[in-house]
Image (spheres, rainbow, N blue to C red):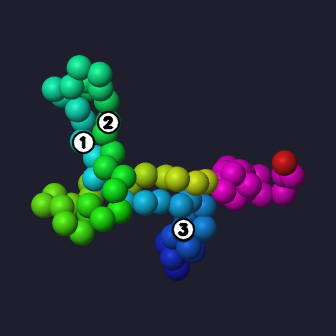
Amino acid sequence: MPGKTRDFRFQKLVNIVHKKASVELQGQLTRGQLVVDRRDWHAARARTPCNVNIVQALDMQLYKKMLLDAFGHPDIEF
C-alpha cells in the first residue's frame, strides 16, 4: 500500500490549516489580493465553508529526504 505510506509521510511533512479566503476585487488598498479570514470562531458560523488549505510549517529535512528518494538518490547526505 504505497499510497498510505505517502499519505503518512505527507502528514508529517506539513502543518496545514483550513481557512476561508477570497480575492478582494473592490478595495482600494488590497485590490486583487488574497484575503484570508483567520478568525477561528468564524468557520463554525460562516455560511460559506473553508475553501483553502494553507501550509503553516514545513519539515525541510524530511522534504529534502523525500525529494532525494523520489529521484533515486536515497543515500546522499545533506
Query: Image point 25% across, 24% down: which residue?
Result: 31
Give x and y (percent) for residue 52.
Answer: 33, 52
**Of 73 and 77, the residue lying toward us:** 77
Residue 60 at least partly seen: yes
Q: Residues within 10 Å of mark 3 (few under 14, many from 20)?
A: few
Residue at label 1? 22
Give x and y (percent) for residue 61.
Answer: 74, 55
Q: Are marks 2 and 3 in contact (CB under 8 Å)?
A: no
Residue at label 3? 11
Q: CA distance from mark 1 to mark 2?
A: 6 Å
Q: Earlier in the sequence, mark 1 or mark 2?
A: 1
Residue at label 2? 34
Q: Secondary structure at mark 2?
A: strand
Q: Secondary structure at mark 3?
A: helix
Give x and y (percent) for residue 30.
Answer: 29, 26
Can residue 68 be found in the magenta stretch? yes
Q: Amino acid at mark 1?
A: Ser
